[in-house]
Image (spheres, rainbow, N blue to C red):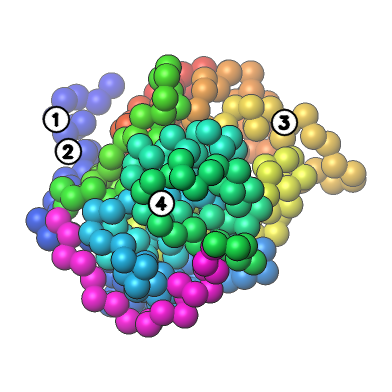
Amino acid sequence: MATTIERQAAAPIVSVPDRFNIADYLVDRHLREGRGGRTAILCGDDAVTYAQVAERSNRVGNGLRSLGVRREERVMLLLLDTPAFAYSFFGAQKVGAVPIPTNTLLKSQDYRYMLNDSRATVAIVSEPLVPQLAAIPRDELPYLQHLVIDGAPTAGGIGFDQLLAAEPTLELEPTGKDDAAFWLYSSGTTGFPKGAVHLHHDIVHTVMCYAQGILGMTAADRTFSVAKLFFAYGLGNALTFPFAVGATTILWPGPPTPPNVYGQIERHKPTLFFSVPTNYGQLLAHKGEGADFDLSSIRQAVSAGEALPKALYERFRDRFGVEILDGIGSTEILHIFISNRSGRARPGSAG
């Protein structure tokens, strides 16, 4: 058992300057340090470099400014897991606005509540999700001024391409480390969802304490997350963690059915795989034709969201030779804060 001194020595020291913008840290820093040509995102047939994410998020930021979005104003992101999510999330932060990644599986009345509670002035929405917002009478959304659609724009909407047509260079908003960087709505309580406000420095702590401190994540990794980007768990797994270390994220906008998940793993070969116990059970229940599915690229699997049964851990390990690290996280704390460690996992325990 580690002594108190050993535990303190192993804990990362996190120092963030007073003037700090998380999008600059996660995106633009890689260009300054010579990693602009590295692949940041794989999504289907698309491969997007860090330089392209930087330019496109600049364009989105300038586009939001042209729509009148000001510092600290909220921007709802009702987006599927595509590169447009990254451009919008980082673009809003670059101009000091506050993106709100929003659950894509909710109903119109939920979106009405969140739009009014957050007073978001702009909503950026994937085309398949537009009907959920279109069903809300506009006079019931007093704060929403613009609907931006990633896809074919409808009447009263603005095409996402209009944002991407803005200037490619941007003057970064001089935000502070304690300024709001994004909101996430939590459904873990009774009553209406609660907005958890996260600051510009928060992501740095989760990266250093978990992504690097527990997973040992480096630029050589590729991440694939069954949990979508609108979850705190998925946002770290598939966006902030890989971007912090210059790694590659694999995005999949479709449902995480076993054929889809196995297909993405075999095609893009992630080294880190993040899922939840229910999905691990579905993967184990699914049998292919001929040889078993190839998960040999995965050096570490992670589970959160609910308790991982010991039997499930052992079946996955025995079938694929991959260890699952179970952990506990929350929307309010942003990611996993109690976890097993690689090589020392205790089946049936969260750490």
- Residue beneath label 1, please? 5
Magenta run includes residue 159: yes
Q: Which mark is residue 282?
A: 3
In the displayed structure image, the side of residue 63 where residue 306 appears, left or right: right
Question: Is disc 4 surrounded by few (<14), some (14 to 19) or many (20+) residues within 10 Å?
Answer: many
Q: Nearer the viewer, residue 221 or 52?
A: 52
**Mark whose residue sits in front, 3 or 4:** 4
Q: Which residue is mark 2?
A: 9
**Real-space CA distance between mark 2 and mark 1, rounded to the nearest whole angstrom:** 6 Å
Residue 49 makes an appearance in the image? yes
Q: Which residues are magenta?
A: 157-176
- Helix or strand or loop: what does disc 3 sit on? helix
- Front disc: 1 or 3: 3
Alpha carbon separation for disc pair 3 and 4: 40 Å
**Category of crowding for the residue at label 1, using alpha-carbon neighbours closer than 10 angstroms: few (below 14), some (14–19), many (at least 20):** few
Q: Is 308 located above or below residue 52 in the figure? A: above
Question: Which disc is residue 144 wearing?
Answer: 4
Figure quadrant of the C terminus: top left
Whether tag 4 and tag 1 are in contact, CB under 8 A, the answer is no
Three-letter code, disc 3 = Gln
Q: Are marks 4 and 2 in contact (CB under 8 Å)?
A: no
Under mark 1, the amino acid is Ile
Asked whether residue 324 is in view, the answer is no
Give the quarter of the figure containing the N terminus: top left
Sequence-first disc among 4 and 2: 2
Using the numbered discs, state the Cα–Cα distance from disc 4 to disc 1 in whole angstroms.
52 Å
State the image coordinates of residue 103 (x, y, percent, origin top left): 52, 40
